[in-house]
Every structure is written in structure tokens, then in C-alpha cells.
Image (cartoon, grey):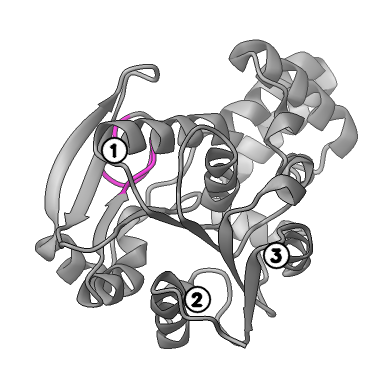
């Protein structure tokens, strides 16, 4: 579970917002729940660090409309003749966070596509949710794919797992820093950041989310379908990840029959994306080399 202090530092919500949520809790729990869901689905755009600029300069840039969402994605493409990879980043992230993995895969002969999720990076909109990320993966696969492999990070891994269980066909999937095998803990941790009754407001947010998007939140839980996945899988997690407990990835490894797992140390939740050990293992995995 994510510690409340870490979540608060990550989201950097002003104290006035926390106070407003607690005031609405006393005045109208209904309004308080709407405020919570509003911020839960509003990612924060962070400045792109210098280390990612070379990847951006080398990429072919394009814009892709997702009609069912009426949102436009920024897409980055490293063109090559080999098998095709789609990269799916996590919450508050951006496609260029994969710069190390993308360039290593490209150097190994793979054709690589990354994109910014809705409300992230240079894509349009201010809001995003897991269902929308799944729609983005499906649309990109149909319109500019197909892709042979999908590499995903954090919440992007929940969406990618949902995508591979559906109509898309990938030869393999790589998950990095999977935050949870169920969606509910993500809501509970977020509510807890505000110091409000966690179960009560999670139930209220679920009810509104399911009514608005016509989908049960629990239907997105990887634990509900992981044991039926037959796709070749590489599961990567850092033992000292403070944002996502490695038990989620260990649980996924136990459920997915055709899976390998790599547990690292000292790389945390985001630095793991630019570690040589990780990119090397991914390239070998995609090439079909078995690690023991």
C-alpha cells in the first residue's frame, strides 16, 4: 500500500484542497465524493527532464485522435524494420520516460511507438482514467498497429493487461512496477490522503464512476483474469518500490502461467525505467531468450 505522505508529496495538493474536502465531508458527503473523483482523474503534468530530450528529438512525432474519447494523443515513433513495440506509461508520466528502454529496443532492431496518455505530456484533455487508457491502446493497435509487444509501467500495466485479455493480439507483454492486482486499493489510498473515511468514499466514488462510464470498476482488476492469460510475460519490479508493493508483481507472476519475473533493488518506482539491467533484460526477453 502507498504511504499517505508519499501520495501527498507526489500529488502536491494544496492544503486548501484538503481543507475543502474535509469541509464538504461535513456539509455534503455527496459533494465531497465528487471533489475526490475530480482530482483522482486529474493527472499532473511534470516538466520533461533533459535526459529525455534526445529521445524526443530522434522520434517521428504525430497526433492521433481517439474518436470515442474525443481526445488527441501525442505519439512518438522510432521507426525500424523489426517487430513492433507499444510503450504505455503510468500516471503523471509521459511517453518519453521510456527513453532508455525505447532507444535500447530500437538499437536492437525493434520498431518502437510511445505516446502520452490523455491529460499527460503533450496529449489533450485534463482528465484520464484506466478505461480511457485501454481505449487508447486498442485504438492505436487498430489504427497504427498491429503491435507485436507491449511494455507498460505502473497504472499503464493495469490497462495493458486488460488490453491483452481482449481483442488485441500481442506476442508478449512486459509489466514494470504494477501498482496493484485490484483497482480498489488505489482509490482507498487516495481517499486516505484527505483524512476522510476510506471505505465510505471509495464506495461512493465507485458508484459514480460505474454510473458515468457504464463499467464495473472490479471488471478491470487483473486478479480477475490473470490466471486465464496465456501471453508470454515478463514482470519487473523493484523490491524497495515505495509507490507500489512488489507483492502485486509476485502475485501476477504466480497467476500468469507463461511468465518470468525480475526483481531489482535500489531502483524505486520510476528510476527503474532507465536502468541498464532492466532494458537489457527486456531486449533479451523480446528476442525470445529465456533467463533463468
Observer able to see residue 193? no
155, 165: nearer the viewer: 165
Give the CA separation, mark 2 to mark 1: 24 Å
Mark 3 closeness class: few <14, some 14–19, many ≥20 residues within 10 Å: many
Q: Residue at x 24, y 38 (%)?
A: 144
Q: Quadrant of residue 279?
A: bottom left
Give the CA separation, mark 1 to mark 3: 29 Å
Picture disc at residue 260: none
Number of numbered labels in the structure image: 3
Q: Which residue has dot 2 on it?
A: 272
Q: Quadrant of residue 290?
A: bottom right
Q: Residue at x 50, y 32 (%)?
A: 167
Secondary structure under the numbered disc 3 in the rendered image: helix
Q: Indicate whether 115 appears above or below 78.
A: above
- Residue 107 part of the magenta segment: no
Q: Indicate whether 136 appears above or below 272.
A: above
Picture disc at residue 249: 3
Observer able to see residue 43? yes
194, 173: nearer the viewer: 173
Q: Is residue 255 left or right of residue 129?
A: right
Question: x%, y% of residue 73?
Answer: 28, 36
Range of residues picked out in magenta:
115-124
Report the mark closest to the observer, 1 or 3.
Answer: 3
Q: Residue at x 52, y 46 (%)?
A: 160
- Residue 121 part of the magenta segment: yes
Q: Quadrant of the C terminus?
A: bottom right
Question: x%, y% of residue 60?
Answer: 11, 53
Give the CA separation, mark 3 to mark 2: 14 Å
Picture disc at residue 123: 1
Secondary structure under the numbered disc 2 in the rendered image: helix
Question: x%, y% of residue 15?
Answer: 62, 45
Please identify the dominant SS of the magenta region.
loop
Amino acid at each position: 500500500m502507498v504511504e499517505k505522505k508519499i501520495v501527498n508529496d507526489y500529488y502536491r495538493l494544496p492544503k486548501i484542497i484538503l481543507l475543502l474536502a474535509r469541509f464538504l465531508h461535513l456539509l455534503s458527503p455527496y459533494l465531497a465524493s465528487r471533489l475526490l473523483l475530480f482530482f483522482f482523474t486529474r493527472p499532473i503534468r511534470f516538466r520533461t527532464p533533459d535526459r529525455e530530450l534526445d529521445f524526443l528529438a530522434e522520434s517521428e512525432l504525430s497526433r492521433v485522435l481517439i474518436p470515442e474519447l474525443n481526445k488527441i494523443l501525442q505519439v512518438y515513433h522510432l521507426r525500424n524494420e523489426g517487430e513492433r513495440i507499444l510503450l504505455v506509461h503510468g500516471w503523471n508520466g509521459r511517453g518519453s520516460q521510456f527513453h532508455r528502454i525505447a532507444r535500447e529496443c530500437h538499437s536492437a532492431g525493434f520498431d518502437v511507438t510511445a505516446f502520452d496518455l490523455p491529460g499527460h505530456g503533450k496529449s489533450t484533455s485534463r482528465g484520464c482514467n484506466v478505461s480511457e487508457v485501454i481505449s487508447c491502446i486498442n485504438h492505436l493497435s487498430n489504427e497504427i498497429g498491429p503491435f507485436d509487444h507491449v511494455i507498460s509501467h505502473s497504472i499503464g500495466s493495469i490497462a495493458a493487461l486488460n488490453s491483452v485479455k481482449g481483442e488485441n493480439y500481442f506476442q508478449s507483454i512486459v509489466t514494470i512496477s504494477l501498482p496493484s492486482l485490484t483497482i480498489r486499493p488505489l482509490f482507498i489510498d487516495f481517499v486516505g490522503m484527505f483524512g476522510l473515511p476510506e471505505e465510505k468514499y471509495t464506495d461512493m466514488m465507485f458508484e459514480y464512476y460505474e454510473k458515468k462510464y457504464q463499467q464495473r470498476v472490479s471488471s478491470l482488476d487483473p486478479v480477475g483474469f490473470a490466471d486465464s492469460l496465456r501471453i508470454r510475460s515478463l514482470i519487473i519490479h523493484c523490491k524497495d518500490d515505495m509507490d507500489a508493493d512488489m507483492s502485486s508483481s509476485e502475485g501476477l507472476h504466480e497467476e500468469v502461467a507463461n511468465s518470468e519475473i525480475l526483481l531489482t533493488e535500489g531502483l524505486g518506482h520510476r528510476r527503474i525505467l532507465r536502468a541498464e539491467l532492466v532494458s537489457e533484460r527486456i531486449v533479451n526477453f523480446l528476442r525470445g531468450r529465456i533467463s533463468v
